[in-house]
Amino acid sequence: MATFPDASEAKVVVLTLRQATDRQARIKKLLDDAGIEFEFAWGVDGRKEQDPLLNMYDRRKRVRLKGSPLSQGQLGCFAGHANIWRSCAKEDRKYVILEDDVVFNPASLLSFLQIVPSLPPHFECLRLFKNKTRNHKEYEVAEAGPFKILRYTKGPMSSMGYYLTPEAARKFLASVKPVFLPVDIYMDRYWVNDVVCLGLSPDFVSHDYHFESMIGYEPKSGRRPLYIRLNRELFTLSERLRRFFYNLGLSRQFRSTKVSHYE
């Protein structure tokens, strides 16, 4: 069975809940068949378990700015990723993090693991899946083995699979409080956490849609009051302006070529 070289360079971890045994069996088989060593990272079921991150949740701010609270599942998902970030920083080791409901191209994942030692240190976090958000631009900033490194002007709104350095983990943890957004949206706020939003082409991770989401969302409660709608619009405008000006600085920092524009 083939295994990738320099196994100590990057640690592959799969985020899962202890009760999700069907998901664990499926992804374990995929990784075992590819000859990729990995560990399960036990997530937090926000409906049943307590975690220090849950104490950082600012429900009042969340409702004021977004109109509805985060679900317990969303909070648990955030806590699970944050615990992995803590382990990454503590071990001072690069991680490849997969959620348990993904599929991946085994050859591409192996190729990526092989190039990890050669990645420059300023490539601190790379999303391993396609950015499907609307109205974002992609710029090629480097080549690494068979991959092109892309800088996104807008985050991909998912945390299903990503490469993480200890430096990025520390940055995420340093700016995590207060918690009022889902983990993927928090990761996308690179103008706050200072972790540049980067991806790969070709991508090689995607969702397995045979599994239903275990996160759960708060039910919508009808039309929101005017002041909440105004707060939401002001927050959205503020985020767009901050992202715009941060992107201006990044365009000067990274020598890049625009490769696509998604409407």
Image (spheres, rainbow, N blue to C red):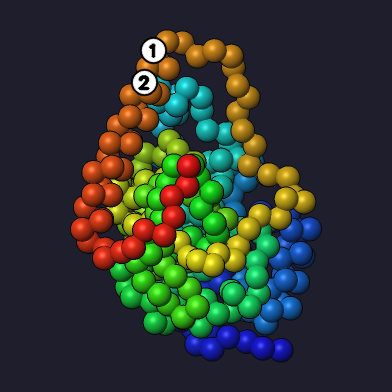
Which of the labelled discs sits on residue 231, or is there none?
A: 2
Q: In the picture provided, is 116 more to the left or to the right than 211?
A: left
Element type at marker 1? Answer: helix
Q: Quadrant of residue 232?
A: top left
Look at 47% across and 22% down and name the residue there. Answer: 67
> Are the residues at dot 1 and dot 2 in contact (C-beta closer than 8 Å)?
yes
Look at mark 1 in the image and give the residue it sits on: 227
Q: Residues within 10 Å of mark 1 (few under 14, many from 20)?
A: few
Q: Amino acid at mark 2?
A: Asn
Depicted 21 relative to depicted 94: above or below: above
Q: Position of residue 52 (x, y in %)?
A: 46, 46
Look at 51% across and 28% down and name the residue there. Answer: 69
The residue closer to the viewer here, 38 or 120, is 120
Look at 68% across and 62% down and name the residue there. Answer: 103
Separation (CA) of disc 1 from disc 2 = 6 Å
Q: Quadrant of residue 185?
A: top left
Q: Quadrant of the N terminus?
A: bottom right
Q: Residues within 10 Å of mark 2 (few under 14, many from 20)?
A: some
Q: In the picture provided, is 223 more to the left or to the right than 171?
A: right
Q: Is residue 130 visible?
A: yes
Which of the labelled discs sits on residue 82, or is there none?
A: none
Look at 45% across and 61% down and name the residue there. Answer: 199
Q: Position of residue 160 (x, y in %)?
A: 57, 55
Q: Position of residue 104 (x, y in %)?
A: 65, 66
Q: Is residue 97 visible?
A: no
Q: Amino acid at mark 1?
A: Tyr
